[in-house]
Amino acid sequence: MTAILRFAPSPTGRLHIGNLRTALFNWLFAARENGTFVLRFDDTDRERSRREYADLIERDLAWIGIRPHRTARQSERIALYDAAAEKLKSAGLLYPCYETPDELDRKRKRLAARGLPPVYGREALKLSKGERAELEAEGRRPHWRFLLPNFRTEPFSPQRTDLAFDDLIRGETVIDLASLSDPVLIRADGSYLYTLPSVVDDAEMGVTHVIRGDDHVTNTAVQAAIFEALGARVPRFGHHNLLTTVGGEGLSKRSGALALETLRGDGYEPMAVASLAVLVGMSGAIEPMADLEALAARLDFSAISHSASKFDPAELDRLNREIVHQMPYEAVRDRLAAMGVSEREGDAFWQAVRANCDKVPEAKAWAKIVFGEIRVPAPEDEAEREFRAAALRLLPEGEPGPETFKAWTGAIKAETGAKGKALFLPLRRAITGLEHGPELGPLLPLIGRERLVERLKAG
Ligand code: GLU
């Protein structure tokens, strides 16, 4: 059996790292099983869904390296949902309800006052045809609820009905269907909530595994009942823990800081983001994985914590730094070219500066220092002025090469007696204008004689 997985975001905002966690669990599992990955936009909420968001979500996923085998939009598949709704209606499993939100609220409060759980009492199921016609004549439009299979013969006395499933991540999971209200599947304006379309699509697309956040555990019980009512095979479900901010708040599509778009704009590497999205809240080291294939090998559903995990930006910084410090030139060639670093010098430049970059865009400042014009600070005192004059005089003839730094500093040391910090710091200040930075030796051939002379003379 080929594994078929899907990621089903509602296009109502940008993806954040928590959404990516869900997407990757599905993508990596599909990749490991040589299966298929479907990107499905749950866009039946006409008010909040936007095509632009769907396009941006595709771009965010592509940045990570997720390229769906198939993309589907629920808004284009309404006929399938209508057919399923008809089927449920004619089986008496989808019934019209006319309560307004206010009326429902009052019902819930009355139940709470009696110490009862806020479960819908199926009052609308008692309406006669005539009563329904009267309500409609008043201008009320029905919303439709699915009749949960939690009773023997009499829907008004639900009985404990344990729906059990073997969760891929959490193991044996049991939900009592009598503890739930019949879910609304169709709104009064005729639009579908995600519950039914998701089941119809999963069945029609042959989805074999659904990995999603553990905020969906109860939905799974409801949806398993709908699969059965439609005569479809129930996929295998897995519910992963959710990510929160360091402060413990849930991530939302509107909390921009952890949006993939923001992380990309801030210069993070996709594999730093992907590695953390998957490995946080999973036992084992959080380390940067080289690529999605290596990350797939680390996927272990039994190792995922059952409680929420904190997403710590400092961890992302660490992973990113580790990746950048090891990164080969080929991986940054284009980005360096965009900073004006030529192909001829690119490799040597990158080898010289990467250990001083936590993020690739930081290379731009080093490119300016190496290849551009900088303002060298004036000597702090007479001694530094003399030091610079000596350094200029002792600079070996010709264009600097790999050995120049050693020969040059040897000569300066012999003449001025300066050594250690007293030798390297004033040299670094004169050459780069800074007190810290990459090793000077490899920089000299890149800076070139002309700029070196100019800088030693300046100030
Ligand atoms: N659109 C739903 C969500 O974003 C999909 C849940 C699911 O994976 O079934 O929560």
Image: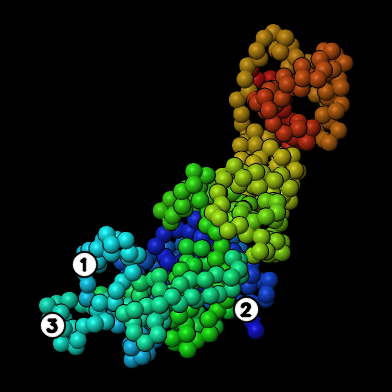
Mark pair 3, 2: CA separation:
50 Å
Q: Farthest residue toward the front?
A: 114
Mark pair 1, 3: CA separation:
17 Å
* Label located before the other in sequence (2 or 1): 2
Category of crowding for the residue at label 1, using alpha-carbon neighbours closer than 10 angstroms: few (below 14), some (14–19), many (at least 20): few
User: Where is mark 3, residue-wise?
Assistant: 134
> In this orientation, does residue 6 appear?
no
Q: Which structural element holds mark 1?
A: helix
Q: Residue at x 24, y 66 (%)?
A: 107
Q: Nearer the viewer, residue 333 or 245?
A: 245
User: Where is mark 1, residue-wise?
Assistant: 103
Q: Which structural element holds mark 2?
A: loop
In the depicted structure, whether residue 79 falls above or below residue 386: below
> In this orientation, does residue 13 appear?
yes
In the depicted structure, whether residue 445 falls above or below residue 108: above
Q: Are marks 3 and 2 in contact (CB under 8 Å)?
A: no
In the depicted structure, whether residue 83 falls above or below residue 62: below
User: Percent x, y for residue 88?
Assistant: 37, 87
Check residue 3 in the rendering and tell me which mark sits there, or answer none.
2
Q: Quadrant of the N terminus?
A: bottom right
Q: In the displayed structure, does residue 126 sit left or right of residue 74?
A: left
Q: Residue at x 66, y 14 (%)?
A: 379
| Disc 2 residue type (three-letter) | Ala
